[in-house]
Amino acid sequence: MSKDIHLAFAHPAERAEVTAQGTLHYDRISLRDHIVDVEIGAFQAERGTTQRIQFNVVVEVQPIEDPLADDVDTILSYDRITEAIAVELADERLNLLETLAERIADRILLEPQAVRVFVRIEKLDRGPGALGVEIVRDAAHLSPEIVEALVDDSPKPRLVFLSNAAINSPHLGGWIDWLQAQAAPVILCVGLPEIDRPITGHAMTQRRIDLLAIEQNGWRLAARDFRCVVVDSRTEIEWAMKNGQISLWAPSKIVLDAVDGPQSASRDALALAGWLAQDLQAEELLVITDTASAVSDISGNVPLRHISVSAHTLSPDA
């Protein structure tokens, strides 16, 4: 490590470069000068009031060998850094910046691409200058106990499958009102539209056509209620679950990219919803159709509930 004293106060990106390990070269992503109002500190004067806390974070990540294809799911998103900060700030009031830095580093290092992380946190309102700490951690720092504790707090969504009759129902707005008021994140799924779609007679091309037709039907639902935001990547789904956004699943990308994808036919949209519910460990798959027989073939360990399109509410007493 260089002994130049200015590096002690340089941005973590410069420190990461200077402390690069041997001949290994990692890509880096960074968050600079991210300021949040926080109640934190061990002194009595710091209780009951907020102060500005500045975060600078650099994450060294494994270089991506395959072509990026401009795909957000192949990289470590910047959102993961800001989410790690937000989650730890919301968890409990802390006395020490050191504790906060450690927890943020642990959460970031859960990401499979992350190799090493630099976290610098500074209090901006405790004196004429910035008072802070900086830590460096690598993936080997994570114990199984830390990993288990962090993974267990991921949100469990409620998946809701809407048939065409449900999409067209006058109750649609009320159902979405009720879903939005619940604690669980909401992911909406739809089936094929009622219009005809091309039939190719070729399995691979037909699969893509069917999936795209489902997505078109999703956009039709999105036009009926702007609270339903169409998403097509795991990164978007995970962000939405953590930020209270109702997601409307466009299945093509996730289904086609899945290593252990659904075995059902692509035209069986309800089975696709069941597969996604299993994959996300959903707390419930709620199916709103005009016939209960449509849900009889769905299997798995996710609780399944059917609501008729004539129902005025989605509550358990419906």
Image: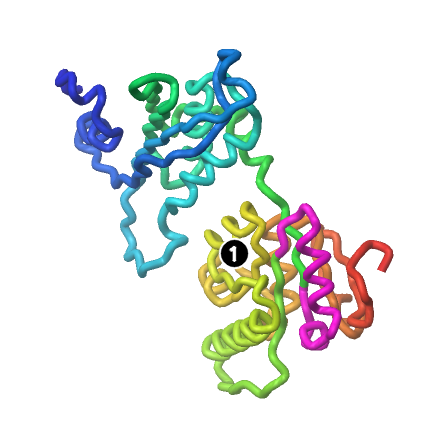
Residue 34: within the magenta? no
Q: Which residues are magenta?
A: 161-186
Within-10-Å neighbours for mark 1: few <14, some 14–19, many 20+ = few
Which residue sits at x=52%, y=23%?
Answer: 49
Place of residue 255 in the rendered image (x, y in percent of width and height, measured from the top left): 51, 63
Between 58 and 33, the one lying in front of the other is 33
Between 281 and 178, the one lying in front of the other is 178
Secondary element at tag 1:
loop
Residue lying at the far top of the rendered structure = 43
Between 164 and 53, the one lying in front of the other is 53
Total residue callouts: 1
Which residue sits at x=59%, y=52%?
Answer: 279
Which residue sits at x=65%, y=65%?
Answer: 271
Identify residue for label 1.
260
Place of residue 158 in the rendered image (x, y in percent of width and height, measured from the top left): 67, 53
Place of residue 164 in the rendered image (x, y in percent of width and height, measured from the top left): 68, 76
Between 107 and 266, the one lying in front of the other is 107
Kind of residue indicated by mark 1:
Asp
Place of residue 220 in the rendered image (x, y in percent of width and height, measured from the top left): 57, 75
Give the vertical position of 64 relative to 135 (above or below): below
